[in-house]
Amino acid sequence: GGGRGRALPRASVRAMRSNPARSRVLATDGNTKAWALSDGGRELAQALSEALSCGDGAVTMTIFQDADGGVAREDDDVYVGLDVSKDAHVDVLDRVEMLVEVTLGDLVRIRRRVAAASLLENERLKIQDEIDAGLRCEFSLGYKAMQDLLMDGGAKVKHVQNVCDVDRVVVDARQRTIRIVGKDAREVARARDMLEVAHETIEAVPDLALRMIVGKGGAKVNDIQKRTGAHVSVSFDKNSVFVRGCPSAVKSAMILVKSCIKTYEVEHVEVTPETLDDVREELARLDMEWGGSNVHYVGGGRGNRGPRNGGRGGDGNRGD
């Protein structure tokens, strides 16, 4: 059969079809043609070898390009030619032709599916690479957050698209999912921060700490909300603080809320006289070990130094 060389042989389709008793010509589709041209028809010949074997050696197969067009071109159509040398083998030729035709049809379907699967896999890999590079992102919203986002005809989404340099923002209301695609990872992250809604909860917060977070007349919590843009609610019944908003706002608000709680904890540490004495002793020990002036002597005392500056010295006193 054909396909032993890098290029396919040339043959006249018209000439082969002029003797239908001894030769048959089967056309290939675009995918099979590209496949045959890629390796000189070797794999295609191998795929058809089982069908050809039913000819008991009487049928010859050739995979070739049409030579009837005059000037040979690389994009000329590819054909599978079958022929026998004797009229007595026509029945065998018919059988092989039928098998090759069915096999070619199956190969076409298989290669289309393989090509589609390959295309799908390449697209998935491309999307994953862009996700890893920050050029795509996907996140979910709660029911209320999605309803809020869709209010006013999606004005917030349109605003994000106007102020952020992203290619598109896809809102999947049924799945409550947002997908953002762009060419700049920073712009994609910025758009996500404007659309995503984060939630954080701090539990088991003492009542006095909650009062510090609220502040007089709600001044403190209002200030936190104004500074960060997050919504902060305090529940005295559950001894909890709830923070809601875009991720960067929630992160900032959590820092300020936790700072209030830590301030409460420090201000309400019980300090006894015994504790203060222990602290003083520890400070004195550290001062002795590390010294409080620029020159320090450890383990020998200052009185062991020899005379200096005219012999002044003494028994335990410096000569200065």
Image (cartoon, rainbow, N blue to C red):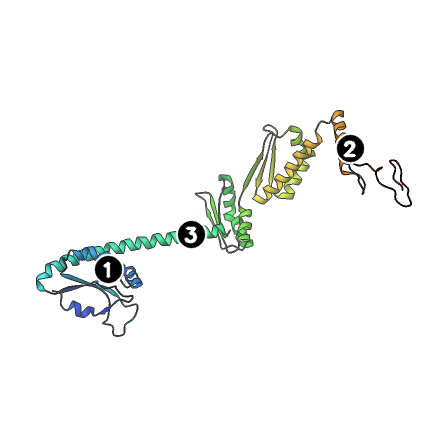
The answer to whether residue 224 is above or below residue 92 is above
Residue 72 visible in the snapshot: yes
Of tags 2 and 1, which is closer to the observer? 2
Of tags 1 and 3, which is closer to the observer? 1
| Sooner in the amino-acid sequence: mark 2 or mark 3 | 3
How far separated are the C-alphas under marks 2 and 3? 65 Å
Q: Which mark is residue 45?
A: 1
The answer to whether residue 81 is above or below residue 295 is below
* Mark 1: secondary structure: helix
Query: Which three-letter amino acid code belongs to the residue tagged 2?
Result: Ala
Nearer the observer, 304 or 139:
304
How far separated are the C-alphas under marks 2 and 1? 94 Å
Write down the quadrant of residue 312 in the picture: top right
Q: Which mark is residue 161?
A: none
In the rendering, at what x and y percent does residue 112 appear?
Answer: 30, 55
Query: Which three-letter amino acid code belongs to the residue tagged 1?
Result: Ala
In the rendering, at what x and y percent does residue 24 appear?
Answer: 16, 63
In the rendering, at what x and y percent does residue 192 appear?
Answer: 53, 48
Determine whether label 2 and label 3 are within 8 Å by CB. Answer: no
Nearer the observer, 18 or 157:
18
How far separated are the C-alphas under marks 1 and 3? 32 Å
Q: Which mark is residue 125?
A: 3
User: Residue 221 vs residue 113: left or right?
Assistant: right
Query: Which three-letter amino acid code belongs to the residue tagged 3?
Result: Leu
Of tags 2 and 3, which is closer to the observer? 2
* Mark 2: secondary structure: helix
For label 2, the residue is: 284
| Sooner in the amino-acid sequence: mark 1 or mark 3 | 1
Q: Residue at x 54, y 42 (%)?
A: 197
